[in-house]
């Protein structure tokens, strides 16, 4: 059932508060996505402050991304059924409370649990933002609003490490990491008041009954169990001795196969699925989802391993670590806007070019750490990270546009939800994998973090290279399809 238009009974008279409402959505969207990257520079301080292990640190980062991704689709459907404003406010309150719990955590377990709750809350809020934009805007205004949302996503990821560094510098090594979480409280409270006043509501007659069948809880559980079974041996690689931990990959495969069978069964009965498997009959959608998932597994780990390396290995302060990744942030912020304008002209070739630049930048950062060992690596790696950042800006938004281009409008919502879910799961799994490699190398060469950084970044570059190969396959397929559709040359 489609969601009714609540902006106005007359599309020529849009809601006069729509831009203020958009500002509220962008602020909260920025805050929830910021927490994906801002915590990276806080990891060494968390380790010292509450005695967190390497596994704890991996869960602090990847657990948030995983919980965020697993609730996106379900939260979007709940918002459609019961009202986006109400769902947005519930998610925002939960996010603020979880942020306070993170900032007040007395031990690693409390912090990890609070981060998982925070991730769930962020995943509840995020789909309401895109839904409210669709609800409030039409035509060119909608394109502009989504462009601002895309820019917010890029900027939040980019400025996270730098802002985290500033907050830790202000609070000191022992307590500064708590500021990283506590800063969400005043922002969230102000945004909550504004949301209550400005966001459009849903009339009671437009609300739908909320049934379990409307968001496929069985599918969510099966997919969650599959992903967690894959992540556990990776995150706990150092803590769980021996090879028995890898036996968890067997139930992971069983859960995933069961998930696919369950989704196919629901589809055959015409019931609501977590993942509409018919979407994967579209080549560009299938390959685009895989590109997104694999790329997020690679590029989000840049901040993770690099900031750990320069802080733990080279003695950088949190602020210096944030400044060290600023070239990537600048490159990404600038090229993201350009990429949105060029994607219609160059298609998947633009995404492939961006991925190639990211691989070159990652490899360049590794070579910089070899050529300029020691404290000067921040300067030596600045240019490679700028190249990687420019490339990243040409990947994310254009890939989303191309992936959804052939999707029927009736299935656009679930298609976007599946795409975002894949990206978040990719982030979580990538951090778990690269983190396991990084910490294993640190254990093998105590006192020298450079090899750990070099190997970890190489693994991340390898993941990005896989995404590049897939993008090239899609670009060649699109070119072949275009040639077949074009008239034969005379």
Image (tube, rainbow, N blue to C red):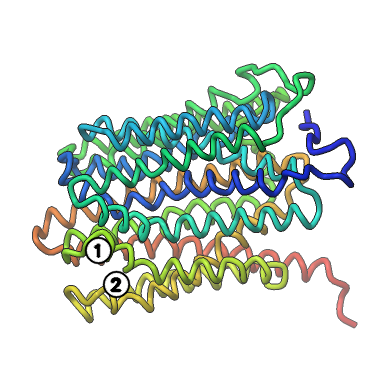
Q: Residue at x 35, y 76 (%)?
A: 382
Horizontal side of 154 relative to 9 (left or right) equals: left
Horizontal side of 185 relative to 484 (left or right) equals: left
Whether residue 417 is visible here, answered yes or no, is: yes
Residue 57, label in figure: none
Vertical relation: 463 (above or below) 19: below
Vertical relation: 242 (above or below) 397: above
Question: Where, by quadrant of the figure, is residue 108 drawn?
Answer: top left
Whether residue 283 is visible here, answered yes or no, is: no
Q: Residue at x 21, y 49 (%)?
A: 45
In this orientation, which residue lies closer to the viewer: 486 or 373?
Answer: 373
Label 2: few (<14), some (14–19) or many (≥20) C-alpha neighbours in 10 Å: many
User: Residue 478's spot in the image, x, y percent?
Assistant: 70, 65
Look at mark 2 in the image and give the residue it sits on.
Answer: 366
Position of the N terminus, as image quadrant, is top right
Question: Where, by quadrant of the figure, is residue 336 drawn?
Answer: bottom right
User: Residue 171's spot in the image, x, y percent?
Assistant: 24, 50
In this orientation, which residue lies closer to the viewer: 58 or 233?
Answer: 58
Label 1: few (<14), some (14–19) or many (≥20) C-alpha neighbours in 10 Å: many
- Do residues under tags 2 and 1 come within 8 Å of each other at their CB atoms? yes
Q: Residue at x 23, y 64 (%)?
A: 310
In this orientation, which residue lies closer to the viewer: 242 or 142?
Answer: 142
Vertical relation: 374 (above or below) 36: below
Look at mark 1 in the image and give the residue it sits on.
Answer: 453
Instruction: Check disc 2 and report its element: helix, strand or loop.
Output: helix
Q: Earlier in the sequence, mark 2 or mark 1?
A: 2
Marks 2 and 1, Cα distance to the nearest angstrom? 8 Å
């Amino acid at each position: 059932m489609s969601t009714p238009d609540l902006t106005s009974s007359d599309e020529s008279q849009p809601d006069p508060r729509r831009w203020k409402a958009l500002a509220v959505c962008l602020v909260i969207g920025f805050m929830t996505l910021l927490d994906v990257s801002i915590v990276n520079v806080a990891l060494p301080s968390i380790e010292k402050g509450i005695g967190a292990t390497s596994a704890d640190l991996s869960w602090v980062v990847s657990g948030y991304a995983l919980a965020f991704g697993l609730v996106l689709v379900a939260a979007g459907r709940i918002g459609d059924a019961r009202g986006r404003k109400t769902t947005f406010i519930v998610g925002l309150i939960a996010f603020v409370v979880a942020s306070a719990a993170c900032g007040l955590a007395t031990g690693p377990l409390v912090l990890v649990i609070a981060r998982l709750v925070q991730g769930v809350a962020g995943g509840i809020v995020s789909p309401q933002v895109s839904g409210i934009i669709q609800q409030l805007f039409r035509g060119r205004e909608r394109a502009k609003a989504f462009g601002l949302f895309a820019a917010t996503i890029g900027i939040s990821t980019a400025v996270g490490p730098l802002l985290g560094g500033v907050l830790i510098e202000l609070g000191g090594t022992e307590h500064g990491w708590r500021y990283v979480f506590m800063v969400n409280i005043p922002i969230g409270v102000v945004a909550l008041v504004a949301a209550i006043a400005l966001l459009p509501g849903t009339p009671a007659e437009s609300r739908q009954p909320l049934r379990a069948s409307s968001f496929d809880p069985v599918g969510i559980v099966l997919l969650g169990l599959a992903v967690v079974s894959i992540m556990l041996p990776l995150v706990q690689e150092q803590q769980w001795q021996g090879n028995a931990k890898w036996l968890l990959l067997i139930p992971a495969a069983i859960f995933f196969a069961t998930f696919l069978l369950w989704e196919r069964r629901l589809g055959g009965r015409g019931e609501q699925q977590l993942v509409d498997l018919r979407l994967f009959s579209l080549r560009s959608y299938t390959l685009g989802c895989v590109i997104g998932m694999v790329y997020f597994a690679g590029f989000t780990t840049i901040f993770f391993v690099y900031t750990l390396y320069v802080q733990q290995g080279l003695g950088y302060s949190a602020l210096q670590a944030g400044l060290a990744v600023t070239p990537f942030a600048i490159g990404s912020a600038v090229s993201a806007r350009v990429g949105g304008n060029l994607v219609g002209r160059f298609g998947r070739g633009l995404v492939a070019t961006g991925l190639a630049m990211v691989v070159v930048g990652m490899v360049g950062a590794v070579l910089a750490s070899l050529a300029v060992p020691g404290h000067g690596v921040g300067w030596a790696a600045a240019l490679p990270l700028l190249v990687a950042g420019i490339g990243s800006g040409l990947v994310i938004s254009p890939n989303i546009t191309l992936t959804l281009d052939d999707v029927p409008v009736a299935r656009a919502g679930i298609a976007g939800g599946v795409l975002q879910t894949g990206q978040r799961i990719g982030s979580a799994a990538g951090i778990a994998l690269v983190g396991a490699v990084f910490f294993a190398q640190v254990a093998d060469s105590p006192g020298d973090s450079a090899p750990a950084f070099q190997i970890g970044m190489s693994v991340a570059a390898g993941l990005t290279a896989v995404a590049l190969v897939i993008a090239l396959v899609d670009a060649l397929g699109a070119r072949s399809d275009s040639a077949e559709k074009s008239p034969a040359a005379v």
